[in-house]
Image: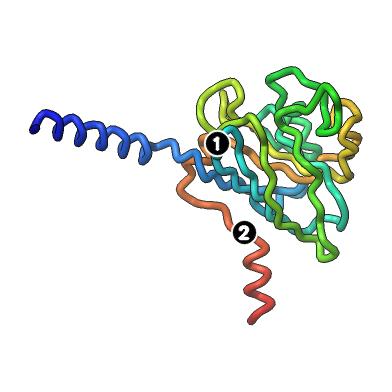
Amino acid sequence: MYRKLTIILLLSLVMLMSCQGGDNRSPLEVRLFNVDKDAVGTATFKEQADKVSVQIKVEGLEPGFHGVHIHEYAKCEGPDFESAGNHFNPEGQEHGLMHPDGPHLGDMPNLEVSADGTADVEFELQGVTLMDGDKSLLREDGTSIIIHSGQDDGVSQPSGNSGERLVCGVISLEQANDEEKPTDPTQTNKKEEEE
């Protein structure tokens, strides 16, 4: 009886410690910056079964549709964010949600920005994880999220003819364990309007 109870307690303790470890991977909030290094929003990544959900809150963009993708490196160096590399594509697929030989694991639907320049949407990245493995957004040094100037046509190589890279955010374990959580600039603006 005591032995069973001891084993159950030890297993419970191990599970609790693994959940409260230093790697708080989910949810993971990422700051989004424009090419002028201004904070323009956040992307929140949450681990789900066989996918990761991504909630994007952003402001200051041109109204309309914008391509948004996960890129292979955790670098957001200006002025063009080319340091982020190509799309996250560990399976070697073609680009595009509508391509018969696609998509990249980092491909997402277009982000629709409203007339006031803001967007608050949630997407799903199928087949990726925030945990360990080749398909982890946090593998090696991490990855990045990029918002482009134009709409992703869903088939053109290598990035859907989606134009310049306007906004970038680093997705990394360092970001995950950062004590100072990113602020949501859209909330600050709403508070100022109310006053």
Q: Measuring from the top left, give residue 111's x and y in whole percent.
A: 79, 49
Q: Residue at x 76, y 34 (%)?
A: 107
Helix, strand or loop at disc 2? loop
* Depth order, front residue of 50/62: 50
Q: Residue furthest front?
A: 1
Residue extending farthest to the top is: 92
**Residues at badges 2 and 1 in contact (C-beta under 8 Å)?**
no
Residue 162: assigned label? none
Amino acid on which disc 2 is placed: Asp
Mark 2 or 1: in front is: 1
Instruction: Estimate how packed mark 1 is, as few (under 14), some (14 to 19) or many (20 or more) residues with alpha carbons within 10 Å.
Output: few
Between the C-alphas of marks 2 and 1, the distance is: 27 Å
Q: Quadrant of residue 130?
A: top right
Q: Residue at (82%, 61%) from the top-left corner?
A: 114
Quadrant in the picture for residue 146: top right
Q: Which residue is drawn at 71% across and 29% down?
A: 105
Q: Residue 184 carries which label?
A: 2
Quadrant containing the N terminus in the rendered view? top left
Left or right of 172 on screen, residue 19: left
Q: Position of residue 122 (x, y in %)?
A: 68, 50
Residue 65 image position (x, y, % from top left): 86, 50
Question: At which x and y percent is residue 104?
Answer: 75, 27
Q: What element carries label 1?
A: loop
Query: 4 or 24: which is nearer to us?
Result: 4
**Residue bearing mark 1:** 49
What amino acid does circle 1 point to?
Ala
